[in-house]
Image (spheres, rainbow, N blue to C red):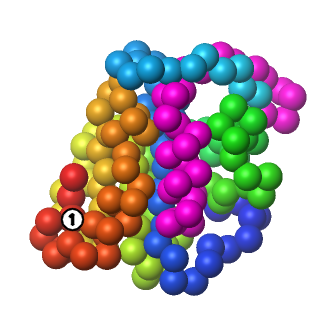
Amino acid sequence: MNGTPAARPGRPVAALDVDGVVVLEHPEVPVERRSVSAYGRWRREVLVPRVAAARLARLAEFFDCVWVSAWSHTAHPALREALGLPEQEWPWLGAQFDKLPAIRDFAAGRPWIWIDDGIDDLGVRPDPPDGLLVRVRPGHGLADVDPEALFKKLDRTPLEERCW
């Protein structure tokens, strides 16, 4: 994890991948082409769902957001301007593979959601007792996510039904 402040106690955690969630390779939903850069060292064109900025802002109202992506420490600075992210960087977890243990460690007993397009590829069991697996469809990413519904589902769903 990076050196950003710790999450607020009691708030649930939203762990977010970038590729396939915020940045789409073969979009099937309306997207915007954005030029992103981190630390002035690289620049690339990406396609983000048009709803991405609003969905991320809404997620941050309900959850402590954390990046769990190959983008690691570059996720927030690269996407900040393109998606209207807050100046204060969201934490990032140094887990490109086998993300679930890192998410659980960061959550520290709090409920969590993991939003990713590759959850099945990572060998995660479909019924974690402490969080929700939110599988987004390839080409849809955050367009598949309803932050308020996830928050409500996380709080009220029996453990055996907590997998999307």
Question: Secondary structure under badge 1?
Answer: loop
What's the residue at 49%, 35% (across, down)? Answer: 51
Q: Nearer the viewer, residue 93 or 163?
A: 163
| Residue ranking furthest to the left | 160
Residue 105 in view here: no
Which residue is label 1 attached to? Answer: 162
In the rendered image, the vertical position of residue 151 relative to residue 98, given as above or below: below
Q: Is residue 12 magenta?
A: no
Measuring from the top left, give residue 113's x and y in whole percent: 39, 61
Image vertical order of residue 23 relative to residue 120, above or below: above
Residue type of the residue flagged with mark 1: Arg
Question: Residue at left 75%, top 36%?
Answer: 81
Q: Is residue 146 left or right of residue 9?
A: left
Compared with 68, 136 (above or below) is: above
Q: In the image, 37: left or right of 154?
A: right
- What span is in magenta? 38-66
- The residue depicted at 58 percent of the width and 40 percent of the height is 53
User: Which quadrant: the N terminus?
Assistant: bottom right
Residue 50 x %, y %: 52, 28
Please identify the quarter of the rendering in which residue 9 is found. bottom right
For this rendering, which residue is in front, 125 or 56?
56
